[in-house]
Amino acid sequence: MNSIKGFLLISILFLSTICLAQVSDELMLYRKDFKNISGKNTVSVTSYEKNGSHFVFAGGVGNIDVYSLDKEGKLTPISNHELYKKKGPARGMVADNINGTDFLFVGNKHGNAIETFKILANGSLERVSLVEDTEDTHLGTAITLQVIHMKKASYLFVGGLENTPGLSSFKIEADGKLNHVQSMKDDDKIHTDGIIGMFTHNIKGKTFLYTGGFQDNGVSSFRVYENGTFKNINNISDNTTDRYLTGAYPVTGVTLGDHRYVIVGHRHHKYYDPTTNFIKRKDFVYHGDGVSVFKVNKKGALVPHFVLKDDENTKLAGQTRIEVVSTNNNEAILAVGTRDDASIQLCKLNEGGILSPINYLETGFSIYYGLKSHKIGEDNFLIAGSNRFDLNKVATYKIAPKVDKNGKILRHIVNLKYKVDATEQQVHEAEEAFVNLKNEIPEITNIEWGINDSEEGASKGFTHTFTITFNNENSREVYLFHKAHLDLVSKVGPIIEDVFVMDYWTAAN
């Protein structure tokens, strides 16, 4: 009897594993909301849960916007806070709890400073500390921050870019103030010139930090000690065979079973203007785009393991952020944000360290540093910030099993009510501008429109209906955030009294 129960239990577990794998292979992103920000663009995004409430922090040029995030993925603006010298953009933002107090740490990129804010009960911020760059630190053009908790203290690691590259460690005091512990200047050996990604692993009580060097095209491993000091363990450079590290950018990691992995993306130097002096080493070789997976050995060093290469079925050109969406003992779901493909690519990393693509969504805007995963209950969300000065928005997406829409097309219905003082000429120009979107946005397959002719008296004052057809979700996202669409909204907005929008899927004719 016991053997039968054991067999049934094993069978159930086996079937559950298969079902979970099938679900993860069909995950998709579904946009839930988007909101304006007060900064000039959205560069960094992070999130935090405090006493059961969920908050989003979006850092742009000059300030930080705070929103609440509900279980449906909806954003509600709370406050905005000015950065030191009104500089920025805010980069490398990380929220954490230090000795019972919640803080947000911010790298003020062009302010050459690290700002510490206390997170108040409603999510608003109160600056409690400011550390400016000196000759002994590497805070100039501060890019990336990483909090590391040791047994008796917590430390903030800072990576910079451009003029003063290197790695620095600061002890975080109970009041949020930072005390300098150690700085290591970049050299020809380590990869700390332009740290745009950091991650930590703990191996049998020992802490290791991994950094990506954007300018020096590689990754480095460091051992971090209880007092916040650190030393270099090993370094791996780009090559043209089994890794893609030219312009190493996002760095993250996971533990699956007994294996620890570090995942590194890159925005290749080919995507930058070659006439500028921003790229220091101009003798690079472009050999494609790919996400590199490294295995961590028992000594904390990185070992090249696997590469997911970009192809016609993936969106991996110009990776700027990689977020871990979820993990279990067998696999991890990752989200890769791209600047050049302007997409979010979902991937699966199995226990053996093999990375495979799932689905992607073309966001309609490039992602620079603004991508953050967040969980509410059993639901996984992504918060994304645009890298466009003409957009100034932050968006949320829910990650859920893909709904089969084979053979269907998407209708986007826009109903308009014009103001009573809108002139006939203004309305005519608005009509022409709307129809002209078909020529500006190739993702639109068709536009038809008409003026209300109903005599039932239930039109509620709406006079114009525009029906736009898309082939898929990607096309709708591109349309929504396309410059031509935003220009139209800006142009006709002053004469619109009300708008009513509905979307639906239907069988293709």
Image (cartoon, rainbow, N blue to C red):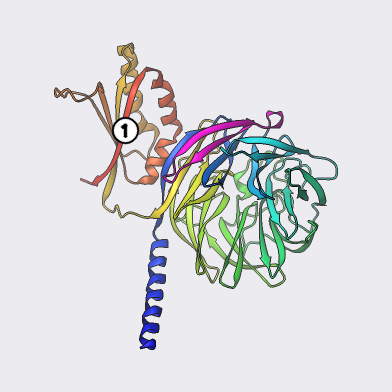
Instruction: Provide the residue span drawn in magenta.
Output: 63-87
Determine the image quadrant of residue 406. Answer: bottom left
Quadrant location of the N terminus in the rendered image: bottom left
Q: Which residue is mark 1?
A: 501
Q: Image height check: is 447 above or below 298?
A: above
Residue 174 in percent (x, y) is at 74, 47
Look at the image and tell me whether residue 138 can be seen: no
Q: Looking at the picture, does residue 473 appear above or below residue 421? A: below
Total tally of numbered discs in the picture: 1
Residue drawn at x 30%, y 55% as measured from the top left: 404
Q: Position of residue 70 (x, y in %)?
A: 45, 43
Tell me the chief SS of the magenta region. Answer: strand
Query: 503 or 266, which is in the foreground?
Result: 503
208 in relation to 360, above or below: below
- Indicate the position of residue 36 as horizontal and vertical percent values: 50, 32
Q: Is residue 391 shown to the viewer in this render?
A: yes
Q: Is residue 75 magenta?
A: yes
Dot 1 lies on which element?
A: strand
Q: Amino acid at mark 1?
A: Val
In percent of the image, x 49 and y 48: which residue is there? 382
At label 1, counting other C-alpha atoms closer than 10 Å, the crowd grade (few under 14, some 14-19, many 20 or more) is few
| Residue at the extreme left of the image, as rendered | 455
Q: Residue 223: within the magenta? A: no
Image side of residue 109 versus residue 64, left or right: right
Q: Quadrant of the C terminus?
A: top left
